[in-house]
Amino acid sequence: MTNPQIGPKGHEPRLRVLTCGSVDDGKSTLIGRLLYDCDQVAEDILESAREHSPSGALGPGGLDFSYLLDGLSAEREQGITIDVAYRSCVVLGRTCQIADCPGHAQYTRNMATAASNCDVAIVLIDARTGLLEQTRRHVRICSMMGITRLAVAINKMDLVDWSESKFAAIEIAFRDFAKEFAFHSLNVIPVSAPFGVNLVNRAPELGWYHGPTLAEWLSAVEVSHKDQAQVRLAIQWVSRAPDGTRAYAGPLISGCLHQGQEILIGPTAYPARITRLYRSAEVVERAEAGDAIAISLDRQVDLSRGDWIYTKEQIADFSNQIAADIIWFSDQALAAGRSFWLKGQGAWIQGSVTRIRHKICLDTGQKIAADSLSINDIGLCNLITTQPILCDPYIEGRSCGSFLIVDAVSHATVGVGLIRNALRRAANITPVTAAVDTQTRALRYGQQPRVIWLTGLSGAGKSTIAKLTEQVLWAQGRATALLDGDNLRSGLCQDLGFTEADRVENVRRTAEAAKLMADAGLIVICALISPFARDREMARSIVGPDRFVEVFIDTTIEVCADRDPKGLYAKARQGLIPNFTGVSAPYEAPISPDLRIATYDTSAEAGAQIICDFIQAGG
Amino acid sequence: MNLADMRSLRELEAEAIHVIRESAGAFLRPILMFSIGKDSMVLLHLAAKAFAPGPIPFPLLHIDTTWKFKEMIAFRDRIAREYGVDLIVHTNQDGLDQGINPIVSGASIHTNIMKTIALKQALDHHRIDVAIGGARRDEEKSRAKERIFSFRSVGHGWDPRGQRPELWGHYNTRLQEGESMRAFPLSNWTELDIWSYIQLENIEVVPLYFSKARPVVRRSGTWIMVDDDRLPLEPNEVPELRSVRFRTLGCYPLSGAIESQAGTVAEILEEMLASRFSERQGRLIDGVGSSSMEAKKREGYF
Ligand SMILES: Nc1nc2c(ncn2[C@@H]2O[C@H](COP(=O)(O)OP(=O)(O)O)[C@@H](O)[C@H]2O)c(=O)[nH]1
């Protein structure tokens, strides 16, 4: 008996292996059997898996090999693997970290997640069914995610009488399909998972096959760690030594650095020289890609978490307009205009999609025109960001060329982006700073510009209070402007309806207009139903959080429907107005508005006074 | 052989340091959950490396159930001093007042009240937004799916479906009021990696990991050490001296020892070559059912 966990390891990095296949292709069985044949399963684990195996399981002692894997009770109940699981296995002396990735149709997200961290992939195909739509989708995702070495395991050979011709037909079909991806290496291997054929051991039934077994392939497959010359160090942390010197710490994602090297700090391209180089606490001469390092510099610089270090040999491009492939994870579709947080190895940056150029059919690879991305869609998009973002193309380095997309309100990760290229260099679009600046305007008008954003149900009293507020401010000698939703819809926004996408756009335009007016020094009052929290959040970020005041005109739907000044509730209740907020479309009340005015116990005049007092007080 | 040659350990080390730095950089009030065991020691060692030449910028938190081995407590206090870190020790006083203990209350209740609830109390009290822990994916099946940054809702709930996808080593660390994270820098390490690293880096661990003649009694197929006189003995039970060591450490009445002669790290590594059992077999709490770990986790045990 050899040891279950150890192997002659250490001299090379782990091989990170993705496994993918459709439900019931036998993926869990294959991984379980591989672990078992590599003697990687401890006795007590084996015992407990045997106990839980269904009767009639094919493995030795009534073991169902897939029970060595499926960890969560939720997935046992459903009989499917619902998430990505990782485990280590020493295969013929090489340490592999195997990502078990679900085959269920909806799980593009998990597949992409697993693929992002893998070097090579094993794709399973059921010998009885051959290539399925699922297989094609999985292979396309592998290729997009940058996996270039594949083993295709044609499983359940026992159920097709170990037929060489069946195998050959699937192999030909697969190679034909895979041509477009130009994989660096592609092996097709006939196997039978529960019987352990061609995993580690061979069997006479497949005597006609002379290629490598799956284990042989795993132990030999080469991973081109493309020795990228470009230096990319992401700063995570600034530490201060007892003597007061600073060390800037982070992962050296690619390239090499040495003591004394001249570097540049991004995005400002400020130069400096390395005076001291630490690799996990030790002072070293040289560090290479993959190391956790820290550097000290020869001069005082403005360098903090989220900045980049690179060299002038491989200039890093920073831009606030980029093109990226987006993989969408959220139930709520992606539409242009909404703003999100973006997070790669650098700083958190706000950005939004300006245009969806097309989406990609995962089955055929065709480009399809689209104006939104639904869950599990992949599409090429243009984005703008509020600050310049590092624009390394994904194909040149996965971790520098990618980012997470995070919802501004819920903070859920709703998608990911794979950068194609910069659309414009940041350097070329330095915004024109008006010669007459904010300060000058504030002096002239004797006021700080503000955008007062009134949100609430139709009939809540937004327009009335907005008008009164403007009158009071005007009387105080303020320079003001009023943007009322109803009025805007007959002009600036006349092309927009009440679908969700149109509402987003309506809010965006109003916010942009308000921003321009605030830039001109005015106090702007906006009255807009703006039912979605994330849209108001977008408005806040367009206008700038410092000068945005969110006012919630809080009135119950019953009161609004009672008042019904325009007769709209009555119509909506009869179903004559689709997407009517509060009746057939949701209203998300602000959780912590800057001001809340309850109009059922406050008069409109008093409400306006509250707002003016708030502004007066400098809020 | 040193670390520079051990490519796979060096890679694991770099990944762990990245996660530790991220925990410090992206959160307001990080803490390192220090259980005193070997994984905690590796974690502490890595934290020292991550912030060098500066100090470790967060305190250690130890949940003291009052039933830890005496040796562990002495070791804990000395190590905190030597590493120059603040140590917060928390005990669930309510639980103590109710007389909860592993012997009368049983393993599950004791663990729930003195460990899980105690941990929540401490995290809430100090308003911790990220708690760094030493859990590994190879420890247990349900852990295999755990994230490196594991999201906890208000009230520390863990929802296996609500976890955030982790791609390319980018971490979504944004939280709302009351939400928190657990960070697991050692996720991809195996027990063997831990011991190999301890050997290479010469990290000190509690002597209970090494074999020595200790007073033990046989219970439920494992050896329980009689660490003090709180362990009631059955009428026919007589503690005997046996050469034993522990693979995992916790409350002494719940930690099973194995018979062994391994007195050094090298000998432990050698013994592991021959072992056919996973390290959790000594942990009495697990036997309750194969989904018990996962249930623990939903309750916030980890
Ligand atoms: N006869 C036969 N059955 C197999 C083979 N591989 C898997 N199975 C069975 O196919 C079913 C699905 O396998 P499982 O590993 O759970 O599939 P997964 O959904 O891809 O993880 C189980 O009943 C397995 O026992 C094979 O090569 N031959």
Image (cartoon, grey):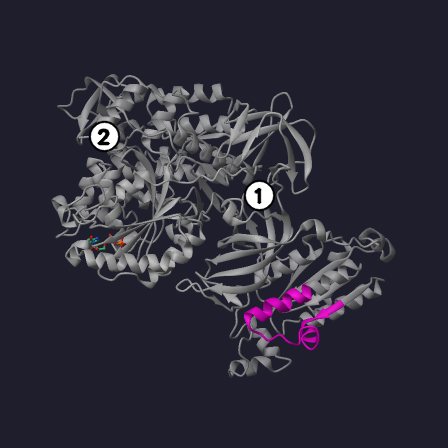
Determine whether label 1 and label 2 are within 8 Å by CB.
no
Task: Give the residue type at disc 1.
Answer: Gly
Q: Which residues, given as a range, are shown in magenta?
A: A482-511
**Looking at the image, is A473 positioned above or below residue B31?**
below
Task: Name the residue beneath numbered marker 2.
Answer: A3
Task: Name the residue beneath numbered marker 1.
Answer: A346
Answer whether residue A239 is magenta in the image: no
Q: Pick whichever, A232 or A41, lies toward us.
A: A232
Chain of the residue under the numbered disc 1 shown in the image: A
Task: Give the residue type at disc 2.
Answer: Asn
Q: Is mark 1 within 8 Å of ligand 1?
A: no
SS assignment at label 2:
loop
Q: Position of residue B284 (x, y in %)?
A: 25, 34
Hey, which residue is sitting farthest right in the picture?
A444
Ligand 1 is found in the corner quadrant, namely bottom left
**Looking at the image, is B208 positioned above or below residue A97?**
above
Q: Pick whichever, A414 or A514, lies toward us.
A: A414
Chain of the residue under the numbered disc 2 shown in the image: A
Query: Which of the 4 quarters of the picture holds residue B116?
Result: top left
**Looking at the image, is A312 positioned above or below residue A444?**
above
Q: Pick whichever, B213 or A376, lies toward us.
A: A376
Which residue is at a point 14% across and 57% down the rendered structure image?
Answer: A161
Q: Quadrant of the N terminus of chain A?
A: top left
Q: Pick whichever, A198 or B22, lies toward us.
A: A198
First in sequence: mark 1 vs mark 2: 2
Q: Position of residue B239 (x, y in %)?
A: 19, 19
Q: Position of residue A573 (x, y in %)?
A: 52, 81
Which residue is at a point 24% across and 36% down the rendered structure image?
Answer: A40
